[in-house]
Image (spheres, rainbow, N blue to C red):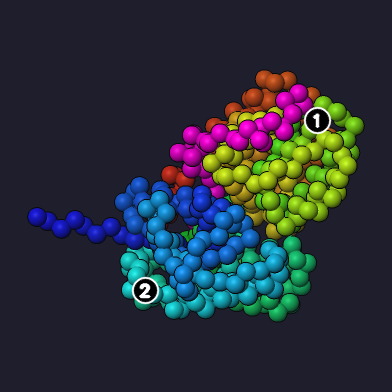
């Protein structure tokens, strides 16, 4: 008998990859599932701790291997940290990089291609070393442009030691990878200015896994029964962090407290949740709900009349945005209220909602009132525009094909 040809293996190095069991982040779990369908094996190398995990992986020693949905995970033991923006988190990232030099390679299938993904830039050094060792293709994926993002969110100077250090890793990645991709459509301009050859860039956005959104799990009855059925529901599902700019939505909630027909539901957790709840303490037009499994998100959105997503008013967004929740919203067929102040506005492009200026509670309030005043058919048309757009442009099947085309 002939031996079965060995499948090529793709390594994905991103210390914040989760799974449906562990929680966010999901992008590379979804990509891995699509790669496997298309004939590849996949090894994901991730960290044992993330502030976004809802359930921590069970680890045994510095490196723990586990199979999840045919994907081989290597969990690297890293220290915990108290806040998503803290020195502890950077120590967590640095330890991950150091330990990658000692990963038990004898337990890993040699890679045909390596995808190294930000936000942490430190492991680009490891990825370059491993790509050289195995003569593998190296793809550097940029989801958040660091250090630009932490400069904006952390209000750091361009001459801050951490910013200067990360800038060195950023430039190294652009200049030493076979290809560089980004979830941000306008990122190429920035990368070329720092040494990337234009022909080595490709755009690979976030998206949706069709098999998950087509067959969602039902929402628990405990949650369903606390969401009003006689109100116009503005809903949010996702992380409640600094970058989600929910403070301005809370200001709009305050401005709308006397509009008794409008009600807000926020589902999720995050570092800003306690402060957001404090801002609206005593108001009876808002409900906070604990995070739910990713497989239930579509079921939750169906209880909303419109979905909300907002951003800070920062220059870095001129390169575009690619939030997973935005594509979940689009697929749901619900209209979207988008607080965003830059070009490359996907809600405007898809004609699937109402966009207003970022960081403007008054404009958010007016957009909500405008949305509530529309006819059901007008809102349905917006929602269907979004669904058509996301199916055409943002399925993970199509995104995986973009990577495979480059790898071949």
Residue 396, above or below 190: above
| Magenta run includes residue 219 | yes
User: Residue 269: image x %, image y %?
Assistant: 69, 51
Mark positioned earlier in the residue sequence (1 or 2): 2
Dividing the picture into quarters, in which one does residue 80 lie? bottom right
User: Residue 120: image x %, image y %?
Assistant: 58, 67
Quadrant for the N terminus in the image: bottom left
- In front: 22, or 307? 22
Magenta portion: prevailing SS class? loop
Q: Name the element at disc 2.
A: helix
Residue underneath mark 2: 105
Q: Residue at x 54, y 49 (%)?
A: 206
Is residue 381 in sight in this rendering? yes
Q: Residue at x 47, y 49 (%)?
A: 30
Is residue 205 in sight in this rendering? no
Residue underneath mark 1: 262
Tell me whether the residue at label 1 lies in contact with that at label 2, contact meaning CB atoms closer than 8 angstroms.
Answer: no
User: Residue 123: image x %, image y %?
Assistant: 52, 72
User: Residue 226: image x %, image y %?
Assistant: 72, 33
Tell me the number on the disc at residue 12: none
Residue 228, above or below 128: above
Magenta stretch, residue numbers: 202-231
Cα separation between marks 1 and 2: 56 Å
Dividing the picture into quarters, in which one does residue 377 lie? top right
Residue 385, above or below 401: above
Q: Residue at x 52, y 78 (%)?
A: 98
| Magenta run includes residue 191 | no
Q: Name the element at disc 1.
A: strand
């Amino acid at each position: 008998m002939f031996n079965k040809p060995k499948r090529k293996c793709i390594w994905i190095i991103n210390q914040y990859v989760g799974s449906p069991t562990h929680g966010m982040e999901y992008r590379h779990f979804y990509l891995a599932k699509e790669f496997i369908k298309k004939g590849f094996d996949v090894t994901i190398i991730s960290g044992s701790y993330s502030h976004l995990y809802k359930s921590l992986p069970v680890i045994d020693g510095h490196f723990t291997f586990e199979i999840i949905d045919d994907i081989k995970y290597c969990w690297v033991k890293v220290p915990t940290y108290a806040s998503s923006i803290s020195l502890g988190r950077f120590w967590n990232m640095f330890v991950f990089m150091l330990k990658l030099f000692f990963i038990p390679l004898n337990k890993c299938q040699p890679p045909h291609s390596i995808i190294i993904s930000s936000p942490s830039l430190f492991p680009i050094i490891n990825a370059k070393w491993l790509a050289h060792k195995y003569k593998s293709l190296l793809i550097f994926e940029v989801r958040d442009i660091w250090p630009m993002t932490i400069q904006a969110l952390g209000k750091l100077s361009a001459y801050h030691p951490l910013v200067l250090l990360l800038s060195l890793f950023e430039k190294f990645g652009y200049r030493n990878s076979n290809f560089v991709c980004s979830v941000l459509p306008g990122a190429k301009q920035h990368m070329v200015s720092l040494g990337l050859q234009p022909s080595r860039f490709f755009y690979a956005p976030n998206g949706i896994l069709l098999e998950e959104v087509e067959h969602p799990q039902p929402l628990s009855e405990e949650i369903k029964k606390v969401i009003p059925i006689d109100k116009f529901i503005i809903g949010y599902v996702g992380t409640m962090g600094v970058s989600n700019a929910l403070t301005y939505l809370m200001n709009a909630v305050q401005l709308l407290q006397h509009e008794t027909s409008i009600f807000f539901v926020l589902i999720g957790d995050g570092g800003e949740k306690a402060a957001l709840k404090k801002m609206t303490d005593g108001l009876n037009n808002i409900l906070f709900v604990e995070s739910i499994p990713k497989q239930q998100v579509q079921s939750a959105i169906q209880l909303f009349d419109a979905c909300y997503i907002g951003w800070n008013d920062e220059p870095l967004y001129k390169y575009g945005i690619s939030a997973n929740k935005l594509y979940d919203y689009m697929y749901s067929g619900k209209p979207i209220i988008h607080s965003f102040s830059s070009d490359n506005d996907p809600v405007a492009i898809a004609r699937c909602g109402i966009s207003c200026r970022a960081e403007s509670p008054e404009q958010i309030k007016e957009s909500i009132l405008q949305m509530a005043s529309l006819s059901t058919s007008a809102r349905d048309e917006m929602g269907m525009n979004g669904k058509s757009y996301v199916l055409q442009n943002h399925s993970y099947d199509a995104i995986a094909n973009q990577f495979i085309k480059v790898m071949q």
